Amino acid sequence: MEPQALTVVHLTADDYEAVRAIWEAAGLPVKPGGRDSREQFVRQMAGDLQAVIGVKQGGELVGVVLTTHDGRKGWINRLAVRPEHRRKGIARRLIDEAERTLRAQGMQIIAALIEDGNAASLALFEQAGYSDFRGIHYLTKRDSDAV
């Protein structure tokens, strides 16, 4: 039996549960009482600044990525693939579609943040042509630990 084809899809706020399930299955930190709540997801999807892209195999959502931008720089965020579907090119397809989406929105700079210790993601983005930008420090100021 041949493996089912992969299909890239743009998701909507109605796909929240499926997206969150992939984040959790992939081991991404999820803050359901804050930035990852259904309410925040719906709010973020309502604007033009965020897109949620998925890859389906046989109708099942197996990978997701978020894109955001500030009008001058695009960001690839929350890339996640179900563990049983890794090493099949799904993450690379998500990066490629995220780049197409951001370029269509006029972004000429695209960036991604990778947490320390995530060697697999770092290698993936380096293979996709991204390079470490030395001298940049990522600082945040948060209203609470939930966000």
Image: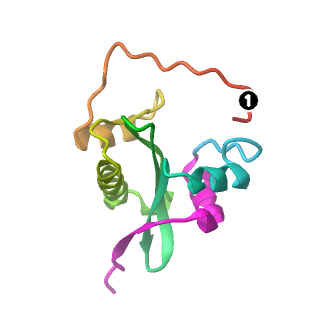
Report which quarter residue 54 is drawn in: bottom left
Question: In screen coordinates, is 138 left or right of 33?
Answer: left
Identify the amino acid type marked 1.
Asp
Report which quarter residue 137 is drawn in: top left
Tell whether position 81 is magenta: no
Q: Position of residue 6 (x, y in %)?
A: 35, 72
Above or below 73: residue 60? below
Q: Secondary structure at mark 1?
A: loop
- Residue situated in front as seen by the camera: 80 or 118: 80
Q: Which residues are magenta?
A: 1-27
Residue positioned 70% across, 42% down in the render = 31
Q: Where does label 1 land, which residue?
A: 145
Q: Position of residue 98 (x, y in %)?
A: 36, 52
**The N terminus appears in which quarter of the rendering?**
bottom left
Residue 80 seen in this snapshot: no
- Residue situated in front as seen by the camera: 38 or 121: 38
Q: Position of residue 9 (x, y in %)?
A: 42, 68
Above or below 7: residue 133? above
Above or below 110: residue 102? below
Residue positioned 50% across, 59% down in the render = 82
Residue 36 seen in this snapshot: yes
Question: In screen coordinates, is 52 left or right of 2?
Answer: right
Tell whether position 10 is magenta: yes
- Residue situated in front as seen by the camera: 94 or 120: 94
**The C terminus appears in which quarter of the rendering?**
top right
Residue positioned 50% across, 69% down in the render = 61
| Figure coloring | rainbow
Q: Residue furthest bottom?
A: 1
Category of crowding for the residue at label 1, using alpha-carbon neighbours closer than 10 angstroms: few (below 14), some (14–19), many (at least 20): few
Q: Residue furthest top?
A: 135
Question: In screen coordinates, is 20 left or right of 81?
Answer: right
